[in-house]
Image (cartoon, grey):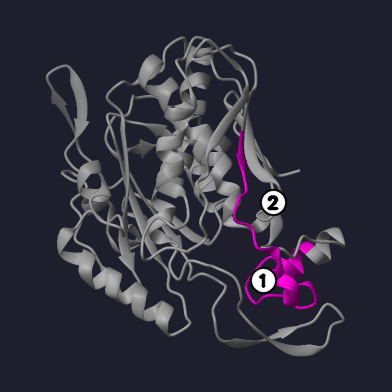
Amino acid sequence: MGSSFGKLFQISTWGESHGGGVGVVVDGCPPLIPLDESDIQVDLDRRRPGQSEVTTPRNEADQAEILSGTFEGQTLGSPIAILVRNKDARPEAYNEMSEKFRPSHADYTYQAKYGTRNWQGGGRSSARETIGRVAAAAIAKKVITSQFAPDLEILPFVESIGTLRANVDTATVTREMIESNIVRTGDPDSVEAMIDLIKATRADGNSIGGVVGCVIRNVPVGLGMPVFDRLEADLAKGMMSLPATKGFEIGSGFAGTEMTGRDHNDAFRMDGERVITTSNRSGGVQGGITNGQDLVFRVAFKPTATIMTSQDTVSTSFEDTELKGRGRHDACVLPRAVPIVEAMASLVLVDHMLRQRALCGDAS
């Protein structure tokens, strides 16, 4: 019912924001991949709340527990179940939301579709659901580097917050540069201004959005399928399935519409025995299949829907009313969105690598 993603490497996430816990079942992971909780915890720590002065103060350690699918430190090839328990849930903060729909949240649409909803933090519509994706992606990255592309790098970064745009060079940005600051941008000169903007927005009881850019290097040639399963189509689905996303573009994106074909085309050349392009406006994908150049894409995130000022809304009895935000929320989701974008990119890539091996015998 919409909680599973992938074909050969398939994940199914479960759990609610203020329930007993959240997690994921991973099916299709090859056997004999070294794996323990510490491999997963690294990325969960990058995603967790309360990690800095610009994120939600909800205090969750988000400790991963592997319940099945491993033995003696290796995967078995059977389904891997991972649990993260909720420790700092405060459902009482949402009591008013039991009778009022939060503007721009999924409250009304869930109620209209299912006839019921979990109003404590939004249930399945909460960004806390993404814990399962990040945990599954930690496994996916181990499969990628051990079996397909040991040098592959997935580097998402905050490209803009509101109207503040960072100057990030996708050819030279490194993970160390991105993770060296709490907003996770690849431009050191933009860090202070972005932090100040998030703090000022939060102090005003408001929220702000932005864009996460991503470059993926050392991508094998040949990933992706023609027609419906184009690599960029699956990337778009993965990214647009994330909470708060409102846009996806790859390569030149919408800016490419302002160019002519002569200016936009990526010319081919030989580099030794390797085919390369002299530009990369295609973003690393042509005809739905990777061409070996860097994958470059962007994901737009809207301002956080919960704000700490009064807004017009409608009650569950369909009367006009007002609602002021409660609870603990990010004024800007961008810093914590970076590891989640990385997770979805990893899940798309590992699935297509396994499909390529099944179809053609080799992912490269």
Instruction: Classify mark 2: helix, strand or loop.
Output: loop
Which quadrant of the figure contains the C terminus? top left
Residue 15: quarter of image = top right
Residue 238 location (% of width, % of height): 53, 44
Residue at 65% x, 69% y is: 105
Residue 331 location (% of width, % of height): 45, 71
Residue 93 badge: 1
Image height of 65 relative to 126, above or below: above
Label located before the other in sequence (2 or 1)? 2
Residue type, mark 1 in image: Ala
Residue 300: quarter of image = bottom left
Report whether 215 appears left or right of 71. Answer: left
Residue type, mark 2 in image: Glu
* Numbered range of the magenta stretch: 83-110
**Mark nearer the viewer, 2 or 1:** 1
Indicate yes or no whether the magenta region holds residue 108: yes
Report whether 182 appears left or right of 271. Answer: right
For disc 1, the neighbor class at 10 Å (few under 14, some 14 to 19, many from 20) is some
Residue 16 badge: 2
User: Could you tell me if residue 180 is visible in this image?
Assistant: yes
